[in-house]
Image (cartoon, helix red, strand yellow):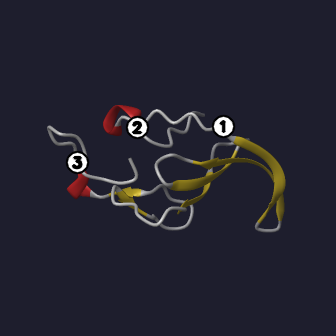
Amino acid sequence: MVFPIHSARRVGLDAQQPLVLADAEWEGKPRKLLLDANRNGFFFVLDRTDGKLLLAKPFVQKITWAHEGGRGERPVMNPINSLRKKGPASAPR
């Protein structure tokens, strides 16, 4: 399963930071995790065996392009930041 963390096509991000693989406990159960402190300002934790999103939480102070979804949900894009001729008016850049 491929899990697109953000759509490079829509917002033009080309993140190059490495993903971290970890074998750790998550909510009391041993799991194989994928950790990503993404350039889009969110920290993601996924179960790397099935691709299930476990956490999507902002880790920077100013994020305007989206807001945190509920537990285990992807960030929710802020509709005011849809693409414009000059690009999205959002942070981080």
Q: Report which quarter residue 85 is drawn in.
A: top left
Residue 58 x/y as whole percent: 51, 62
Q: Say which amino acid is labelled 1.
A: Pro
Name the residue carrying label 3. Answer: 82
Q: Secondary structure beneath disc 2?
A: loop
Against 88, residue 55 (above or below) is below
Counting residues from the N terminus, which is met first, the one under dot 1 or under dot 2? 2
Q: Left or right: where does residue 50 sit relative to residue 82?
A: right
Q: Is residue 88 left or right of residue 6?
A: left
Separation of disc 3 and disc 2 at Cα? 13 Å
Residue position for label 1: 18
Secondary structure under badge 1? loop
In the depicted structure, whether residue 62 falls above or below residue 38: below
Q: Nearer the viewer, residue 13 or 53?
A: 13
Q: Which numbered disc, 3 or 2, marks the residue that appears first in the sequence?
A: 2
- Residue type marked 2: Ser
Q: Nearer the viewer, mark 3 or mark 1?
A: 1
Q: Quadrant of the N terminus?
A: top right
Mark 1 neighbour density, 10 Å: few (under 14) some (14–19) many (20 or more): few
From the viewer's perspective, tell me whether residue 12 is left or right of residue 4. left
Q: Nearer the viewer, residue 2 or 35?
A: 35
How far separated are the C-alphas under marks 1 and 2?
A: 17 Å
